[in-house]
Image (cartoon, rainbow, N blue to C red):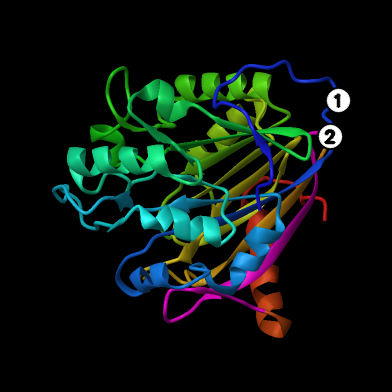
């Protein structure tokens, strides 16, 4: 859990040549509170037993795959997700220290729903990145200090869909941070790099059901690495994709579903987990994957023994189509 002195988001400071200290960062995939998972808002911890892995890290982050509203109009798309602002407190009590909402469901209920989500962002007990009242705010990193290490986290969506077309944040225009505007995202990451020792970019990217990254994912991962990202992670495909090192940058192409409303047509879509990175002096020195399986209630349940090994081995095997090197462990 986060126990830090917080810097004003976007506050400039000169990074030391040799970042001090060690920090552990935990990541998991797509989370929302709807249909079978709506009742989790009345349970602590809402994310179930895997909350232990998130709480054990110095800083933990997930993708919040929903609008935060009770109002608005369903947009012209197939699936619509929403929840109330209490979801943010529920995630905090589950060990989550930040969420990204740069995804294809953040604006499922149109401008009114977006206004409510932005109101929830302003009063949230944890930082919400990847959305904002304009592009400056949506791309702005959340900057904090953990164990003497300055950490910046950003969120953006590379998914080419209705949300990214209709509700991309711009000057004076609220919406999500879009990774399709690569110039703007890379500028935000370079700015974050100037402020922080460790920079995390959490993307919504890839193709649903595809367990290998596409060329656009590989291309933006390389650009983000060049821009100074310590870790580039993400979700969207509803299945896990491989992870590993791209030079000095840890890349995880897909964490899969985590707290999820229904079954998916894709094979292995119930396989998930928490990835915990150890970062020392600005370098990823260890990556540990803790396997889980999304159960019939939509809750990720830890897997041990043969079942756990099967998921872990398959996750490692997914690296073969990524072009990434094995991470330190």
Question: Neighbour class for label 1 at 10 Å: few (<14), some, many (≥20)?
Answer: few
Q: Circle 2 sits on which residue? A: 281
Sequence-earlier tag: 2 or 1:
1
What's the mark number on residue 18?
Answer: 1
Position of 328 compared to 65: left or right? Answer: right
Image quadrant assignment for residue 149: top right
Q: Exactly how many numbered labels are in the figure?
A: 2
Residue 199 higher or lower than 294, as above or below = above
Residue 54 visible to an observer of this rendering:
yes
Q: Residue at x 44, y 53 (%)?
A: 88
Q: Secondary structure at mark 2?
A: loop
Mark 2 and mark 1 residues within 8 Å of each other at the beta carbon: yes
Which residue lies at the image location 36% right of the left edge and 63% below the top edge?
Answer: 33
Label 1, secondary structure: give it: loop
Please state the horizontal and vertical placement of residue 147, each as a whole percent of the image. 78, 40
Identify the mark at residue 213; answer none if there is no mark. Answer: none
Q: CA distance from mark 2 to mark 1?
A: 6 Å
Q: Report if residue 285 lies within the magenta region.
A: yes
State which quarter of the image contains the C terminus. Answer: bottom right
* Image location of residue 257, percent across then percent down: 47, 63
- The magenta segment is 282-303
Which residue does the image show at 55% across and 62% down from the upper left?
A: 94
Q: Quadrant of residue 111?
A: top left
Give the overall secondary structure of the magenta segment.
strand
Q: From the viewer's side, name the closer residue of 81 and 184.
A: 81
Q: Within the image, what quadrant is residue 289 found in? A: bottom right
Whole-percent x and y of residue 310?
67, 77
Towards the viewer: 177 or 237: 177
Question: Closer to the camera, 157 or 154?
Answer: 154
Query: Residue 58, relative to residue 174: is it above or below?
Result: below
């Amino acid at each position: 859990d986060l126990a830090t002195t917080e810097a004003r988001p976007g506050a400039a400071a000169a990074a030391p040549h040799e970042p001090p200290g060690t920090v552990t960062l935990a990541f998991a995939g797509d989370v929302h509170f709807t249909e079978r998972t709506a009742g989790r808002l009345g349970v602590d911890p809402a994310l179930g037993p895997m909350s232990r892995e998130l709480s054990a890290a110095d800083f933990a982050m997930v993708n919040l795959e929903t609008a935060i509203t009770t109002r608005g109009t369903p947009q012209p798309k197939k699936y619509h997700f929403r929840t109330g602002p209490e979801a943010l407190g529920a995630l905090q009590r589950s060990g989550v220290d930040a969420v990204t909402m740069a995804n294809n469901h953040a604006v499922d209920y149109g401008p009114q729903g977006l206004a409510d989500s932005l109101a929830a962002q302003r009063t949230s007990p944890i930082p919400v990145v990847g959305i904002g009242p304009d592009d400056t705010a949506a791309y702005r990193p959340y900057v904090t200090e953990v164990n003497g290490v300055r950490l910046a986290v950003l969120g953006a969506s590379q998914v080419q869909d209705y949300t990214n077309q209709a509700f991309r944040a711009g000057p004076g225009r609220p919406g999500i941070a879009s990774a399709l505007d690569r110039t703007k995202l890379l500028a935000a990451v370079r700015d974050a790099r100037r402020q922080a020792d460790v920079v995390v970019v959490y993307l919504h990217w890839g193709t649903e059901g595809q367990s290998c990254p596409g060329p656009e994912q590989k291309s933006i991962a390389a650009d983000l690495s060049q821009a100074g990202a310590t870790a580039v992670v993400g979700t969207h495909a509803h299945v896990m994709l491989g992870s590993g090192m791209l030079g000095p940058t840890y890349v995880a192409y897909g964490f899969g579903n985590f707290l999820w409303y229904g079954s998916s047509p894709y094979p292995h879509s119930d396989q998930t987990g928490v990835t915990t990175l150890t970062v020392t002096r600005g370098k990823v020195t260890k990556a540990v994957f803790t396997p889980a399986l999304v159960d019939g209630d939509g809750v990720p349940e830890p897997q041990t023994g043969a079942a756990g090994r099967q998921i872990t081995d398959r996750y490692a095997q997914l690296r073969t189509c990524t072009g990434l090197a094995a991470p330190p462990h």
